[in-house]
Image (spheres, rainbow, N blue to C red):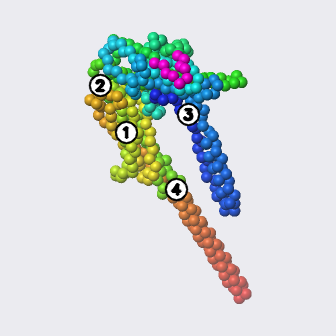
Amino acid sequence: MIDHRLSPSAAAPSSDRGAAPPHPLARRRAAARSRGAFLLTATLIALCSALAVAPPAAHAADDDAVTWGVRPSGPAGPDGRLAFEYQVAPGSVVTDWVAVTNESASAQSFRVYAADAKTDYDTAAFTLIGAEQASTDLGAWTSVDEGQASCPDTDDEPEAACAAGVGVTVTVEPGSRMDIPFTITVPHDARPGDHSAGIVASYASTTGGEGTTVRRENRVGARIYLRVDGALSPGFGVNGLVTGYDGALAPFAGGIGRVGFEVSNLGNTRVSARPVATLTGPFGVALGTIELEPVRNLVPGGVAHVSAELPGVPPALLLFAEVTVTPMPADGAAAGDPLPAALTSSAVTWAVPWSLVGVIALLAAVVGVIVWRRRRSRALLAEELADYADRIRAEHDDAIAREKELL
């Protein structure tokens, strides 16, 4: 398992919380017992949630927590920068320093190397390619302490084995820092515009037993933003907008309106974007607006999936969604960077109150049964009256015939 982090602080533990079970059904004859069972279940869930905390992101062999940091530096130590930022001409060579700090109680070994940056599709976050992948851009141009920087991009086991050996391995004493030089060699034919990567310090640990071994690699790093001189051509796209509606169980209650779409960076500069989704009903009736979190530092060629939902949307039969994505300057970009124009996309879906439709259908069925039963009863009554009339006529005719015989 691999933990990708690009901040100057150490990897932090995460917690996994299970969803609470549904509320138990109340029974009139056992209300007290139901309330007691609910309180007991809630207490157990709270205890389990408090205990279900994942182990720290990294551990030493003796179970002491391993804590470390990575930040821009100089030969004499960190210099206050938050990221490495350069603007260079093709063919340039850049030399700089990165500081790796071991805040643990014992000496630790870290693999320090560079890796290409990417935009995570599911979270829209700035992240790095996997440790088993070979860098093909800025990460491959960056050599840490003259160590290996690039590998053949073959998408197979040899690539993964080669990628595991890039960079250098250093041992940092407890409570101390190591300042490590690195060199970026920009190709003469480098694409103009923005290139992004990260320098990471990776700590690997192995756990398991009984024939099962799990290797966990945790990475902490600092970002590299490099711009190659040349024409800038910003651009992005909004694609695949879909919208949906989840109705509530209550017939007249509002449901949940949903939108999902992709934001793509089609230019050669990093760009951030702020999406806003507007939901309307028939005849332009406003149903709500969703202001989504900005998509930050979308790298050239990056694609991010953005989704959001809005509760309390009334079932208006039709739901119209319109998404407007407005570009913003990326982090570290010059204030005068050109930005692409805002884009708008729209979609429509059904927003049918199915629970209300079900109630109406049930009422219609009940009314239909009642009408059918009444018609059936009337028909049976008519048949009985006709039979009764026929019997009366027959008896009357018989009586007349007997009288005639007596005469």
User: Residue furthest toward the bottom?
Assistant: 407
Task: Name the mark on residue 250.
Answer: 4
Q: Which residue is mark 1?
A: 275
**Residue at 65% over, 57% down:** 35
Q: Is residue 61 visible?
A: yes
Earlier-in-chain disc, 4 versus 2: 2
Q: Residue 211: name its quadrant.
A: top right
Left or right of 152 in this view: 19: right
Give the residue number, with chain letter if any, for mark 3.
Answer: 13
Where does label 2 land, which residue? 233
Determine the secondary structure under disc 3: loop
Mark 4 or mark 2: which is in front? 2
Q: CA distance from mark 3 to mark 1?
A: 31 Å
Q: Nearer the viewer, residue 267 or 209?
A: 209
255 over 305 or under it: above or below: below
Marks 1 and 2, the one that precedes in the sequence: 2
Give whichever of discs 3 and 1 has the lower sequence position.
3
Q: Which mark is residue 266?
A: none
Q: Quadrant of the C terminus?
A: bottom right
Amino acid type, callout 3: Pro
Q: Is residue 249 above or below residue 166?
A: below
Q: Which residue is rendered at x = 51% and y = 58% of the image?
A: 360
Q: Is 250 situated above or below 385?
A: above
- In the shown orientation, is residue 31 left or right of residue 278? right
- Whichever of labels 2 and 3 marks the residue nearer the N terminus, that label is 3
Report the mark closest to the observer, 3 or 1. Answer: 3
**Stretch of the chain drawn in magenta:** 170-179
- Decide whether residue 171 is among the magenta residues: yes
What percent of the width, then of the height, locates residue 276?
37, 42
Whether the residues at callouts 2 and 3 have beta carbons within 8 Å, the answer is: no
Say which amino acid is labelled 2. Ser
Looking at the rendered structure, the kind of residue marked 1 is: Pro
